[in-house]
Amino acid sequence: MTSKASKARPGAHPVPGRRPPAAISLARLAARTAPAGARTITEAARTGTVQEVAAHKRTLLTTFRRSGVPVSTPVWAAEADGRFYVRSERTAGKIKRLRNDSRVLIAPCTVRGRPLGAPLEARASVVPEDREQVAEQALVRRYGLGRVLFEWTFDRLRIDTCYLEILPGVWDSSR
């Protein structure tokens, strides 16, 4: 397979399916050592607001397995026009789970995933390529130099990534 440069990140030339070294083992370790609050976020009252989540550097993103089991991951999320944007590996578990169920919970959290506030309901989807620039600019404005260094590493390793758009709103009864 050949790679092509991302419109949002011209210096990136991802290799389809490429993941960071040791990604799976590190994800398993993170899941085992996650704070209890990250595992019980679905039981909390869903009274969070966009402003509360946007006020913190990290966001706890909770997706759902087919069985309904929640899986929480701390992420960098940037807000723009009432939507949140996240960059993730294209083959990450959260992306796979979103294909089956677009419902997510988001809440402010610590770097390790301990919730710092109430969650709010939202829907998430992968951003189409023609809108990736909006997501990239929101993340650049929010995280600055720290993110530049992190993303430079991903670009050099040619990790296959995508952007998520998270639209806060109350879930309806249908999936």
Image (cartoon, grey):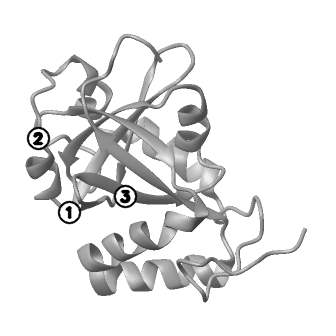
Type of amino acid under label 1: Lys
Query: For mark 1, what is the residue?
Result: 57
Above-or-below relation of 72 to 158 = above
Q: Residue at x 33, y 61 (%)?
A: 76
Kindly state the secondary structure of the residue where label 1 is placed.
loop
Who is closer to the viewer here, 86 or 157? 86
Q: Residue at x 36, y 76 (%)?
A: 137
Mark 1 vs mark 3: give the one in front.
3
Examine the image and state in which quarter residue 6 appears.
bottom right
Q: Residues within 10 Å of mark 1 (few under 14, many from 20)?
A: some
Above-or-below relation of 21 to 142 = above
Q: Residue at x 55, y 81 (%)?
A: 9
Q: Residues within 10 Å of mark 2 (few under 14, many from 20)?
A: some
Above-or-below relation of 18 to 149 = above
Residue 28, image x and y in percent? Answer: 54, 42
Kindly state the secondary structure of the residue where label 3 is placed.
strand
Number of numbered tags placed on the structure image: 3
Who is closer to the viewer here, 106 or 4? 4
Type of amino acid under label 3: Tyr
Q: Which mark is residue 101?
A: none
Type of amino acid under label 2: Thr
Q: CA distance from mark 2 to mark 1?
A: 15 Å
Examine the image and state in which quarter residue 49 appears.
top left
The numbered mark, 3 or 2, whose residue comes first in the sequence reads: 2
Q: CA distance from mark 1 to mark 3?
A: 13 Å
Query: For mark 2, what is the residue?
Result: 49
The numbered mark, 1 or 3, whose residue comes first in the sequence reads: 1
The numbered mark, 2 or 1, whose residue comes first in the sequence reads: 2
Q: Is residue 20 left or right of residue 174?
A: right
In the displayed orientation, state which residue is furthest to the right: 1
Residue 88, image x and y in percent? Answer: 51, 58
Query: For mark 3, what is the residue?
Result: 85
